[in-house]
Amino acid sequence: MMYFYGVVLVMSLFFQGCSPLNTAETEKKIVKYDPSFQKLLNKRNSLQCELEQKKTIFREKKQKINDKIKVMREEKLQLEKEQLSLEEQITRQIQPEKRELQKSLIEMSYQYKQKAELGRSIDRDIDEINSLIKKKESLSLTQDEMRIWNERMASLIENKESVNLEKSKLKEEIEITKLKIKVFR
């Protein structure tokens, strides 16, 4: 029984964290007291050696995997750079067509504004002639003058219809061109 308490006491000191120098001395004392304890020490030493070997193998494998990961990350980065460069090249190839569409849109918008202004001008002229025709009796207009004003009114109405048709076509072309530009974004 005394032997058991001695081993327990020594083991508790051993597991409590003696310094490395004290551990060797403690082990010698224990073996001197109980020579059969050497088997346990040998087994422990063998297992610790095996554990260190396994740790070394693990660290080597882990390092190899980390090296592969590093290489793969570098390859991925290179691939991303190549893809970005390719996308930029393709985008640059389509830019002239896109600029041409934008230029065309600006030109059509300008033409549309001109047609709109022309339409407003024709409307003002039609309003003036209508006002004049309504005042024909107070202005004492002759039939020839009335005929001239009516012909002028008919011509203005015809021009107005033509301008409206051109505006409508331009508006449609502008909308289609805007859609074309959107497709290139």
Image (tube, rainbow, N blue to C red):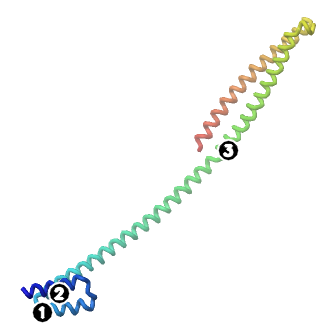
On the image, which quarter does residue 14 sit in?
Answer: bottom left
- How packed is label 2: few (under 14 Cα within 10 Å), some, or many (20 or more)? some
Q: Disc 3 designates what residue? A: 99
- How packed is label 3: few (under 14 Cα within 10 Å), some, or many (20 or more)? few
Secondary structure under tag 3 reads helix
Q: Amino acid at mark 3?
A: Arg
* Left or right of 63 on screen, residue 117: right
The disc placed on residue 10 is 2
Say which label, 1 or 2, has the lower sequence index: 2
Q: Amino acid at mark 2?
A: Val
On the image, which quarter does residue 126 sit in?
Answer: top right
The image shows residue 50 at horizontal and vertical percentages of: 23, 79
On the image, which quarter does residue 138 sit in?
Answer: top right
The image shows residue 51 at horizontal and vertical percentages of: 24, 78
Secondary structure under tag 1 reads helix
Where is 67 relative to 83, above or below? below
Q: Nearer the viewer, residue 10 or 46?
A: 10
Q: CA distance from mark 1 to mark 2?
A: 11 Å
Which of the two marks, 1 or 2, is nearer to us in this view? 2
Q: CA distance from mark 3 to mark 2?
A: 89 Å
Q: Disc 1 designates what residue? A: 33
The image shows residue 23 at horizontal and vertical percentages of: 23, 89
- How packed is label 1: few (under 14 Cα within 10 Å), some, or many (20 or more)? few
Secondary structure under tag 2 reads helix
